[in-house]
Image: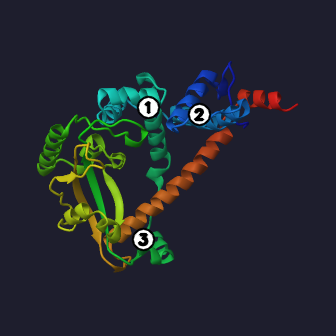
Amino acid sequence: MSQTGCSGCGCPVDGQAITRSELDQYYTARQKQMGSMRLETPEQGDMDRLALLGDLIDRKIIELQAVKMKVTVKDEDVDIKFAEIKARYTEAQFNQLLQQSNQTISDLRRNLRSSLTADRLINREINSKISVTDQDTVAYFNAHRADFNLAENRYRISQIVVNSVPTYGRATLFGSKANDAPEARAKIQILKSRIDNGEDFNTLASSLSDAPSAANGGDMGFLLEHQLRSNTLLFAAVSTLKVGETSEILELSPTDSSTPPGYMLVKLISREGIGQRDVTSPVVQQNVRNQIRNDRSQLLETAYLEILRDNAKVVNFFAEEFFAKNHR
């Protein structure tokens, strides 16, 4: 298989073309997402396009394999994912995000369908077939025993943040719908009530939190005690919680006097004390199994894509054009 590129007439991957306009759109979007449009020589621009073209080729190869394996995504599934993403922004912020990523709504929906299709193909062909035995768990633990010997307490927490002012820009993509402090306070109170009435914290965080951790369902991962103590407000709240409990509403101090405060809810997922963990611990076993699954999934996904590339017929017109232009 020759790895592909594309020219004005398109780049065939098993007979399916990737057009030059698709590549240019992807290139522009990636440049905007990086936050800078550096001055490039024509050669540098072509090199960047050659690299990005590999992503488009892999996406096309996966899409074609999904068709062969009869892996499909319903319109309703795309609708749900689209609504989940849009719910994180005001209308103005959502439109700005589309502009920054050089996408139309149709482009976004098409990309969501492609991503969901790839996830389903990988889950069906790889993840569903991964098994982790007790022997695997013990062997991994013994090889990484030092990683399970904690020198200080650590806490795993999730958060929901509501800002008091609309936020824009790449650094704050999960912008609030609140326009002022009273709206933010009302929003966080509604969220607290919904959680107290049994709604899932992580689900609400995914769609309604203004923090970047919303992408992970609000999960901030593990924090060591000294890290947690550096935030007096957060430590005071977490230290009073039992595992599984959610804090009262916390008021976040603004970085400057002209900015109104924001608000936060915190949930304690787990607390682990100092000392050596044992492989018989259910928490340790689950963490080890998850790590083994993730490692195997990444390795098998890489190998699977290599096999698909080997079996695909790809013609790289863009690479040929670039080579001819620069090889004199």
In this picture, residue 230 sits left or right of residue 190: right
Query: Which residue type carries mark 2?
Result: Leu
> Which disc is residue 200 wearing?
none
Query: N-terminal of the two: label 1 or label 3?
Result: 1
Query: Which residue type carries mark 1?
Result: Arg
**Residue most toward the front?**
257
The residue under label 2 is 56
C-alpha gap between disc 1 and disc 3 = 37 Å
Who is closer to the viewer here, 155 or 269? 155
User: Could you tell me which secondary element the residue under label 3 belongs to?
Assistant: helix
| Residue 112 on image: x %, y % | 43, 33
Taking the spot 65% from the left edge, 36% from the top edge, the residue there is: 48
Q: Residues within 10 Å of mark 2 (few under 14, many from 20)?
A: some
The residue under label 3 is 134
Query: N-terminal of the two: label 3 or label 2?
Result: 2
C-alpha gap between disc 3 and disc 2 = 40 Å
Foreground tag (2 vs 1): 2
Above or below 251: residue 319: above
Taking the spot 29% from the left edge, 35% from the top edge, the residue there is: 166
Query: Which residue type carries mark 3?
Result: Asp
Who is closer to the viewer here, 321 or 145? 321
User: Could you tell me which secondary element the residue under label 1 belongs to?
Assistant: helix
Query: Which colour assignment does the render follow?
Result: rainbow
Above or below 305: residue 228: below
| Residue 231 on image: x %, y % | 29, 62
| Residue 264 on image: x %, y % | 22, 51
Who is closer to the viewer here, 100 or 279? 100
The residue under label 1 is 113
